Image: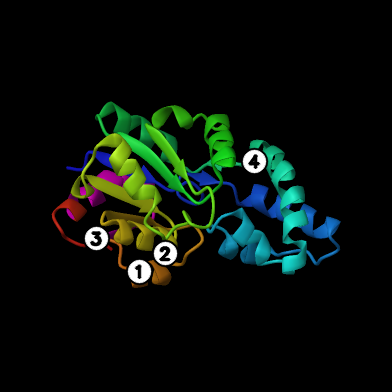
């Protein structure tokens, strides 16, 4: 079986969509822009906060927007974020079984660690790798190879789990197998088009799906 399982955060382990939406609309209101709807916010996340902000305002406002968004979001994360059902139990069971666990996220490092620590998840991970700038943003193959090197794990011994097509492509670009979970920012049809080795509706089925992936058998 795999030795290392790498997870995305948002939409995979944590539901922070409400926190993101509130911080964005606070920022938009301050800058005199129209409010963003829930569906639009959900579809726009996953590519780093700067790319996210740029989707909702002119480029001339992005710098000021980030200066407003980030301090608000630091507080909103603590108030509105929650662990996705089954995630905490899965991480606990994986650690008991001896798996190495890691995070590869486009969310900025500071906010990733605030979020994971607040929700009591940080203790499960051997390494948290997050995109520091646009050169590291998934699907670019930067974060996952960095984790493999740090933990001394081979590509075929690692599995990546995420909720977006960008996660699937990141895993493919890094040469590792990917399991996609539904309920995040990408639709089931979009995930199928990206061709992960499995698509799950619930995290509880991860190890079963991982076994099928290891044997090169697709599970849909």
Q: Nearer the viewer, mark 3 or mark 2?
A: 2
x, y (%) of residue 192?
Answer: 34, 69
Whichever of callouts 3 and 4 sits on the residue coming sooner in the sequence is 4
Q: Callout 1: 10 Å neighbours few (<14), some, many (20+)?
A: some
Q: Check disc 3 and report the residue beneath it.
A: 219
Q: CA distance from mark 3 to mark 4?
A: 34 Å
Q: CA distance from mark 3 to mark 2?
A: 17 Å
Dividing the picture into quadrants, the one containing residue 149 is top left
- Predominant secondary structure, magenta span: helix
Picture disc at residue 165? 2
Picture disc at residue 77? 4
Q: Callout 2: 10 Å neighbours few (<14), some, many (20+)?
A: many
Q: CA distance from mark 1 to mark 2?
A: 6 Å
Residue 200 falls inside the magenta stretch = yes
Nearest to the observer: residue 124 or residue 60? 60
**Residues at circles 1 and 2 in contact by the CB criterion of under 8 Å:** yes
Dividing the picture into quadrants, the one containing residue 82 is top right
x, y (%) of residue 132?
Answer: 53, 47
Q: Callout 4: 10 Å neighbours few (<14), some, many (20+)?
A: many
């Amino acid at each position: 079986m795999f030795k290392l399982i790498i997870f995305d955060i948002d939409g995979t382990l944590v539901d922070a969509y409400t926190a993101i939406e509130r911080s964005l609309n606070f920022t938009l209101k301050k800058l005199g822009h129209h409010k963003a709807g829930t569906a639009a916010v959900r579809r726009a996340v996953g590519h780093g906060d700067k790319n996210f902000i740029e989707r909702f305002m002119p480029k001339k406002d992005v710098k000021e927007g980030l200066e407003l968004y980030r301090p608000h979001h630091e507080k909103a994360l603590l108030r509105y974020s929650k662990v996705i059902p089954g995630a905490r139990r899965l991480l606990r069971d994986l650690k008991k079984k001896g798996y190495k666990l890691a995070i590869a996220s486009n969310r900025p490092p500071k906010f990733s660690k605030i979020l994971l620590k607040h929700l009591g998840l940080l203790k499960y991970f051997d390494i948290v790798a997050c995109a520091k700038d646009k050169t590291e943003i998934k699907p670019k193959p930067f974060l996952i190879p960095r984790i493999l090197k740090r933990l001394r794990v081979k590509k075929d011994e690692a599995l990546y789990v995420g909720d977006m097509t960008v996660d699937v492509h990141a895993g493919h670009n890094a040469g590792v197998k990917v399991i996609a979970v539904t309920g995040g920012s990408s639709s089931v049809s979009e995930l199928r088009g990206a061709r992960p080795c499995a698509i799950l509706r619930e995290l509880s089925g991860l190890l079963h799906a991982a076994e099928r992936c290891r044997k090169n058998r697709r599970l849909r």
